[in-house]
Structure formats: structure tokens, C-alpha cells
Image (tube, rainbow, N blue to C red):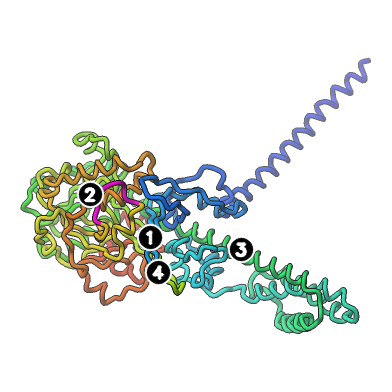
Amino acid sequence: MKGPGTAAGSAAPAGKRRWRCVAAAGAAVALAFFSVVVPLAVLLGLHARFPSMYLVDESAVSVYDGSEGGSWEPIPTEENDTLQVNNTVKEFVLPTPKEWTNTNGSQSDTVIASPIQQDTVLENSSLLNLLQITGTYLRDSFEQGLPGDENGKSCQLEFGSYCLWSVEHEEVMKDFIVKRLKDQLFVARAYYPSIVKLDGMENLSHEMKQNIQEHGHMLSEAISDADLPELHRVNMAKMDQTIAAAKSCDAECTNVEKKLTQLLDMTEDEALFHARQSAYLYRLGVQTLPKSLHCLSMRLTVDYFNASSDMEHSDAEKFGNPAFQHHVIFSTNLLASSMTINSSVINSEESANMVFHLMTDGQNFYAFKNWFIRNSYKGATIRVLNFEYLQMKNLGNGIVDQLSPSEEFRITSNSNALTLNTLTRTEYISMFGHSLFLLPELFTNLKRVIVLEDDTIVQRDLSLLWNLDLKGKVIGAVQFCQVKFHQLRAYLPDFPYNSSSCIWMSGVSIIDLDEWREHDVTGIHHRILEKLRHDTEASWRSAALPAGLLAFQNLIHPIEGQWVQFGLGHDYGLAHGAIKKAAILHYNGNMKPWLELGIHRYKKYWKRYLPRDDVFMMDCNVNP
């Protein structure tokens, strides 16, 4: 009795030890598996079914109903669920207003507007490499439209400014011959079953089988053209001859047609997959804050609280004195706003007479304050304000409770003539954010201000703009008559407006605050917002377009277009002569000059105002 009991007792611990070893080995294998699969899944966009960071898709295009009214809900469209990257992109898409189509005689105009922004922190260098790899696959597709584009939508309509970027940055294909070998192999496999069934074609079928095996062996060991063996051209010539001989035979066409149709469908699906993947990576790159700029903001914030010296201004008496030239900038981008201020004072004849009111949020307030007290700007006075603190302390109107800088909208218009030729225009329109409609309440003692956006560079003295006679109007701004109110009717609520009025650009504007108060522009803006849905961040940001257009209706004094050169953030075709003559450069669009994906030929106008010897910039490797 005792012996068997002891044996069983000793066997049980041994069994437990074996199970522990098996469990430990299984855990190690599982850990190794997930360490490889999870990063790959994130890279390929397979994590679309899980919650992710929120980004705004600047090039999202949805199909909307044709009814008029205030509803801003898009109609759901069917998508290919097998394209995981497309599903990932859809997760980042803002709900946009309805597409409105106006048909008049032989032409119809379609205008689609989508908001864009830059926010999340990410290092862009790795994205640039991925984009150059995936983007070259589609370099020949954009002029004729992309595969699967049944509605004939242009590339820019579906993918935004990525189309322009990909054409400018196309690289030579490193696997051109490999792809040709794959095409030969597929065609040969399509013909082979039919050739084998023919009488008297034993030699041809044997030769085709041998060529198929040789091609398969070469492609199994080659990824790029450099990996191919020296005799690959001989094999290609042999395969060409074999395929030509097979085509001359009286073979059954059903199988060949089926295979070639399959090849076409696979190629179209692959091209569309790569297009969506590349466009997603591009949007991720242009909508994120570079890691170096995030580092700069964090270092300045920490240094502000570690500094022992007094960091307050001695020119506080200038802040509310209307005798000085007052400039207002709403921004959360430290480097961009400092470039706008630096360019303004360098090109000013009386920089000591300039006062800049820089409005930012609580997260960036101390970094901004530290930067502008550490740096001097030719005697100009810089005042940094925390919008959230002012809103909580003084305003408290409940309409705008957080900083809302100027918004940008990608507006694409199509003109379809009877000849079926389609002329597509894509522009990036900047519009006041909701926070800017509180200017009279934020600056109660001022009578006039110049509002600059942080993606502008000033090349001339702004005294002429400051002294401009607005002829009783509230705001002086550049009008953009290529898009008019009637083309945006689906975006405008039930509010009276002149359908032939031009829209305007908010990159730079001169504002008469007394006229603003007299016309109660802030009240008009609030009443418009009450008619619009803004229960989500997406609808709140989208509401900036109709609110900005309608609030200033008939209150805009047009500024000559020579004052501002637009398009440096999306248009590759601008002439350097026009850029040099302009008083102000506006980098409207996705490709901002501080991003690696910015347009390089325009960066020099922005980088000339970049400080070179700042210790924080050197530590954070800030070099756009």
C-alpha cells in the first residue's frame, strides 16, 4: 500500500513540472508571435477594427443625397471590407456636409468641402520612406483616374493633395523587370491548360512548362531587379516566343479569357489598395506635429517653471493702446507663429510700433510665453494669452469654450461639359475659427487689428494695410471669386445670402472692431451656429465654413490680390516671380513648410526667418 502511494505522489509533481514547462514554452512562443504580428498589423492598417487616435481626413469624399436643407449626415456607401487599409482610413474620416450638384443647361458644378488640420505628434521620417515605396506603384495611374473609379472622380477628389505629392516625389521602379516576369508567368499559365489539350503540341507544351518552371524559380529568389540572375533576359525572350506561339494556336479561349480577366481584376484591386494605403500614410504625415516641434514645446514648458528670473513684460501699457499697430495670431504651433512674427518685424519700417497678441491654449501657453520672452523681435511687443483662462475668467458665454483657430477647407469643384471633358479645380480655403469671433470681447480697448494666420510669412511692411480705408466695412480681406455662395448652397443653413457673392480667405485680414461691434457680427455668428448642428467636434469644425461666410456677408472690403500669394502649401506650379512680389505668403494647404512633406521649393521663403542659434532648437534637432 505504501509503495504505490509513494510512486503516485512522485509522479504528480513530475507531471506538474512538465505542464509548467509546456506552459512556459507556449507563453514564450505566443510572446514572440505577437511581437512580430502586432507591429506588422499596425503598419498595414489591420487594426482598423480597434479604437485609434483621432485624425481629420482632408480628402474624404462621400456620396450624399441631393436634397437641400440643414442636415449634415452623409449617406452610407458600400465599401470593400477586404481592403483593411481602406477600413482604417474610414475610421479617421470626418462627417462632412452634403455634396450639392447644380445642373444648368450643358454644365453642372459640383463642390465638395472637407476640413483639414494638423494635430497629433508623430515623427514623419519613417512615413516618408513608406510613402516613397508605396507611392511609386501608382505614378502612371493618376492622370487617367484610379482603378475601380466608376464615377470618374479625379485622384484629387478622392485622395486630396497626396496625388500632387506622389507625382512630384515619384521614384524609379526597382522591380520593373520583376513585374514583367510575373506578367509573363501569369499569361503562360493561362495558356498552358489549353495548349496541353491540343494534338501535336507536345513540344510547345513541354517548352512552356519548362519556361514556367524557370520563371517561378527566378521569382522565388528575386524581389527587385538587382536580385535577378544574369540570364533573366534570355529567359524573358524565350517566354515571349513561347507565348507568341501559343497565341497563334487554335486554343480554347474560355480559360485564357478567364485567367486574363482575373489578372486584370487583381491588378486593379492591388493598385487601389496601394493608393488607399499611400494616401492614408500621407494624410497621417501631414496631419501630425513633428516630434522635434513637440520636443521644443515640452522643453520650453519645463524651462519656464525652472526659471528663477522674472518673466513678465515691461510694456504692458501698449497692450490696450490703440495708437500702436496691433496684430493678432491664434495658434498652437510655436515655431510657425514665431516665424510669422519674425518675418513681420524684420520687414517692418517701424517694428517698435508693433504689438502682437498671440492667443494659444493652456497646453502651449507656458512654452509660448517662455519663447517670446527669451527672444527679442526688433523692439516689437509680444503678448501671449491663454484663451481658455480668458474664456473662463472674463467671457464665459458658453458658445466657444476652447481655442478654435482658423480652419482650412479643401474645396473641389467639377465643371462637366457636353463634350464629357471634366475640369476639376481644388483649392484650400482658410476661414476664421469660432474663437476669432470673440475679438471685440477679447480686445475691448482696441479699434483696429490685423489678423494673421500662423502659416503666413510677411515680406513687406504692413503699414499700408494697417492704414487701409475699409469704407465702412468690418473686415478687409482677399476675395476668392472662383467659388461663390451658390456653389456652396448645401453647406449654408436657412439664412439669407447673396448667391453671387464671392467667398473670402482669412490668411491675412484687417478688422475694424468698432464697425464689428456696431454690426453685431459676434451675435450674427452665434445665431448661425444655433441653426447648425455642432454636437460633435467634427460638426463643430465644419460649421466654421458657413458661419464665417454668412457672418461677414456684405461686410467685406476686398483687398487687392497682389497683397497675398496663396497656394504655397498645395500648388507646385507657382512662379517664383509672383512669390517674390507678394507682400504676404500664405502656405494654405496640407504641405506646410515645417513638415518634411512640405513643398521644398517654397521652404526657403519660410526658413530664412528661422533662428539658428537657439539652444532648445538645437537640442530638439529642429530643422524643417
Residue highlighted by disc 3: 270
Secondary structure state at the residue bearing disc 3: helix
Residue 102, disc? 1
Disc 1 marks a residue whose amino acid type is Asn
Q: Which of marks 4 and 2 is nearer the N terminus?
A: 4
Residue 106, disc? 4
Identify whether 60 is placed above or below 198: above
Compute the Cα span from label 1 to label 4: 11 Å
**Magenta stretch: dominant SS?**
loop
- Note whether residue 99 is visible: yes
Q: Residue 326: image x %, image y %?
A: 13, 53
Compute the Cα span from label 3 to label 1: 35 Å
Residue highlighted by disc 2: 551
Residue plotted at (32% across, 66% down):
567
Q: Is the residue under label 2 in contact with that under label 3 (CB below 8 Å)?
A: no
Disc 2 marks a residue whose amino acid type is Ala
Q: Earlier in the sequence, mark 4 or mark 3?
A: 4
